[in-house]
Image (cartoon, rainbow, N blue to C red):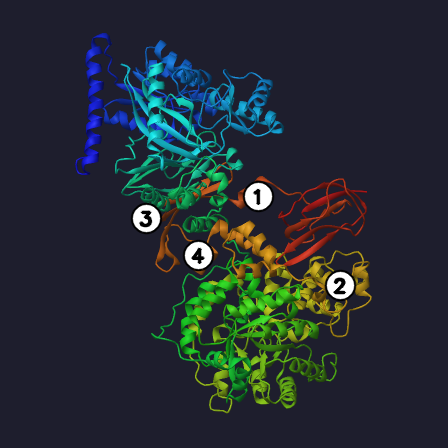
Amino acid sequence: MLLRLGGSRGKMGILLIRRVGLFCRSAHLSSQNLEYRPIKKVMVANRGEIAIRVFRACTELGIRTVAVYSEQDTGQMHRQKADEAYLIGRGLSPVAAYLHIPDIIKVAKENNVDAIHPGYGFLSERADFAQACADARVRFIGPSPEVVRKMGDKVEARALAIKAGVPVVPGTDAPISSLKEAEEFAKTYSFPIIFKAAYGGGGRGMRVVRDYEELEENYQRAYSEALAAFGNGSLFVEKFIEKPRHIEVQILGDKYGNVIHLYERDCSIQRRHQKVVEIAPAAQLDPHLRDRLTSDSVNLAKQVGYENAGTVEFLVDKHGKHYFIEVNSRLQVEHTHIVKPKTFPVPCVSALSISPDLNLHLYFCPIIQQVFRSGEGMGIRLDSASAFQGAIISPHYDSLLVKVIASGKDLPTAATKMHRALTEFRVRGVKTNIPFLQNVLSNSQFLYATVDTQFIDENQELFNLKPTQNRAQKLLHYLGHIMVNGPMTPIPVKAKSSSVDPVVPSVSLGEPPMGFREVLLKEGPEGFARAIRQHQGLLLMDTTFRDAHQSLLATRVRTHDLKKIAPFVSHNFNNLFSLENWGGATFDVAMRFLWECPWKRLQELRALIPNVPFQMLLRGANAVGYTNYPDNAVFKFCEVAKENGMDIFRVFDSLNYIPNMLLGIEAAGAAGGVVEAAISYTGDVSDPMRQKYSLEYYLKLANELVKAGTHILAIKDMAGLLKPEASRLLIGALRDRFPDVPIHVHTHDTAGAGVAAMLACAQAGADIVDVAVDSMAGMTSQPSMGAIVACTKGTKLDTGEVFDYSEYWEVARGLYAPFDCTATMKSGNADVYENEIPGGQYTNLHFQAHSMGLGNKFKEVKKAYAEANKLLGDLIKVTPSSKIVGDLAQFMVQNSLSRAEVEERADELSFPLSVVEFLQGHIGIPHGGFPEPFRSKVLKSLPRIEGRPGASLPPMDFETLESDLQMTHGDEITPEDVMSAAMYPKVFQEFKEFTSKFGPVDCLNTRLFLDGPKIAEEFQVELERGKTLHIKALALGDLNKSGQREVFFELNGQLRSVLVKDTAAMKEMHFHPKALKDVRGQVGAPMPGKVVEVKVKPGQKVEKGQPLCVLSAMKMETVVNSPISGIISKVHVNADSSLEGDDLILEITE
């Protein structure tokens, strides 16, 4: 190889041959004076990478190898690489075991070891160890005990350097014995100074001190660190040189006084005095300085009669002046290659280690390295330590996993190879410094300029680490969690998902045909509205993508299943008015229970369906939330929604409170969307006995909305109360009053009269009605698409051809069996005309009832709903007002309260938070005002809001919010993320935490998402286009003492495993106490749920009725108030505690 590379390398080859020749002549001249003892067996008194490296060299030489290991290292690789392995230091601490000289010598003697290699660290620079080896007639592979003593004592090494004429940094002549000596040194030489361990290196026991205030603390820290690392806490002090380069020269010496150097390495890139990256040869080093460094190194080694490998370390200041630091009289981590002079056109070699990012929590327990895949290839060398799947990374020792060495024709080339190799690594189960190293390797100063020891400190952008995706392992963790603990999304009823996946209908190739969105994009919202009004025949809006599954399946349908059918809809339903596919409850549920980004759903569906307008629900001033937001937040939300592909904004308010609706209308209009102002319908305009919500009431509302500039007028009949006769009256009156405004009607088919009502609306002048595909229609959903199409065919209301895609949804619906309303509701129910429960709320209310233990009392919940509605003044029941009524109904059933009892005890009951906030005026003013005296009894002295609730809120600071999110979650925060956090801060935080832990679960098919795989099941998961995981579930392990089970998979042909906590087993290990009903001071949970906030502390005085904590169950929050006055004696919960009904929250002493 040297010959191929040309003349310069040929010269180097001759130089090396001459030096080897000198060694041979010396050996020949002195051989008669030496005892010949061949080495047949070598022990390495060390562990990890260095032990393995020595074993490999010995094996190549035909020498038998012996490993020693501590009790904590029984599973480490180094003991498996040796021919023999023996336990040392039984009963000692992890480090003390490797420092126990008698044990090591004993093992060596008992097993006929010829020589001991000390490696680096531990005993490698201990003269007493070298002497113990000599006394036992076991060779010490290193310098003589005397040289080890001289070089290991940094003070004596300094004296020897001075004697050899090597410049040194001003420092103490001997190890200091007190803090006072350090103070005297600082007075003489001034700050900054540096403490160094007198009998060890590697950055341990080093502390820089810049003023007197830091002196004592740093002295104590350096002493303690040196004592722990080297068994001796002695320190010496030097003047600290600011921003030097750290250059090391590698030397080799033999027993005959011959010493050669192998040129230099630049070790300047350090953190906390630990070398991070080393470069050989040193970049941009003056040739004359190189000559002085190498010459001084050789002279110093000859001065002491140095033999074996070693390193002489120097600092080079900004003026090019060099100072001796120390001699490492041992092998080093980076002693792996000969570095040739920079003047020759030879490879540049970089050496660095990859190690876990040891945060404090790693000091309490070992970490299992779950996955390991190395980066290899041309120009890359790896020296491993604990680099294998299943390795336990102990917190007790050096954290090196593998050392990576890259070589290339110059530094940028070597850095490119190194970066590529690091990118190939896959290390899971522990955090590593790979992202940091990649930043270093990409830094222009590192690549093209000189660096000093302050490089890392002065380039803080190096710590802007790009997080690794780790998607496959996270998904395995999710699947393992389901296999051990069951579904992670709350399941209302015990029903298994179908094992059959829906078949996607075939789709023709090419672009989909044009639809109404083409009109909207060309003519704008006003032109779009004119086109709708001029259209001949009845138009349909398909709710299958949102409200249908909200109404039937508790809003649990996932983007995965929507995306599969989307291309078919785009190609076959281009004549639809729109698709309702976003907003309302789907926004928060996507994050809360499906762990999907709602914005990603909108983006992906828009890409798949470019031709059909999209419609969303906007809750007026509440946007897509259940509370009020600053006005600018509502405007910003609409703007971002429009940018992501939303077209039509159905704006409504649950109380028909005009000020709230006007804000939503303005926000949607300002964003450039089509405004569809929706009047929420309740009561019965055809019943002269029910006059609170009369025909005149609706016409007056419509008049105000048309004046406000709505493009389309909608009737939103959430409970399905609109009967055919009422439909003719209401829609007929609206058509007469507003002949040029398109009218859109939305209803639910709970009572079974939906098709008849919608046909009546169409005959009375409605332009658009809402329908759902047949297999997702009926009951609490919308009327059947197929029925409406069939009934209008051949009439002036003919909808045109609409292709059936019912079969897909019929099978897809089976995947969501645990959420399907048909689990308890087998048909429509006309009692909706009495209880007035909105269809979209029906399944969610049923879900909540089951989760709170009220599943068998759902009939009572429905009756209580009607009573709760009367208690609150007969409200229009649309989200969020419907939720308020539902919360109160469940509260009444949970606590066995009648309407009369609630009214009587209103001043002492702990009502759901939503009820209290409604009565305060948080969502606006209901038609007819608030119910009295109920309101006053509940609120007592609590503040009341007058007028539009959000009007007094200060503008939201989006820049600060984005900055806070970036601080928490990294720089990948998008404008859409900011809006999610603005709407639902806690839900978004939990969503980000979940996805950070479990990865992109939206890639899983729905059965796997809900139920997980069966043992031996093989399946595929597409992470993104062109990246598919092939997974097989293998086995479920037994419960370990930590309450965990190991779950085994095969991933892309490789064995993988994850540890999962068995929550049921963990619960058996701990039992939460119950509140005793006969003990006045014990406060129990009024319902199952999670603790959101604890408002009191032990020892705090509380008054009767004072809030103690807040519980949350299925989006309903309840404030638990104190039943008595007294002192908090004990708190049994904290934030995020999960409680069952009557679980003890706290105790109060009167």
Q: Nearer the viewer, residue 836 or 416?
A: 416
Amino acid marked by disc 1: Lys
Q: Earlier in the sequence, mark 1 or mark 2?
A: 2
In this view, 407 is above or below 869: above
**Residue named by callout 1:** 1067
Give the number of the disc on residue 920.
2
- Mark 4 element type: helix
Amino acid marked by disc 2: Gln
Give the number of the disc on residue 1008.
4
Position of residue 392 in the picture relative to residue 190 (left or right): left
Nearer mark to the viewer, of 3 and 4: 3
Amino acid marked by disc 4: Leu
Residue at 71% over, 48% down: 1095
| Farthest-out residue, left | 3
In this view, 36 is above or below 1004: above
Q: Earlier in the sequence, mark 1 or mark 4?
A: 4
Residue 4 placed where, x, y %? 17, 38
Q: Earlier in the sequence, mark 1 or mark 3?
A: 3
Q: Nearer the viewer, residue 896 or 966?
A: 966
Q: Mark 3 to mark 4: distance in Å?
A: 20 Å
Position of residue 328 in the picture relative to residue 520 (left or right): left
- Mark 1 element type: helix
Q: Residue 176's image quarter? A: top right
Q: Residues within 10 Å of mark 1 (few under 14, many from 20)?
A: few
Residue at 54% over, 45% down: 1064
The answer to whether residue 753 is seen in the rendering is no
State which quarter of the image contains the C terminus. top right
Q: Mark 4 to mark 2: distance in Å?
A: 44 Å
**Residue named by callout 3:** 1053
Q: Nearer the viewer, residue 1093 or 841?
A: 1093
Residue 656 placed where, x, y %? 68, 74
Nearer mark to the viewer, of 1 and 3: 3
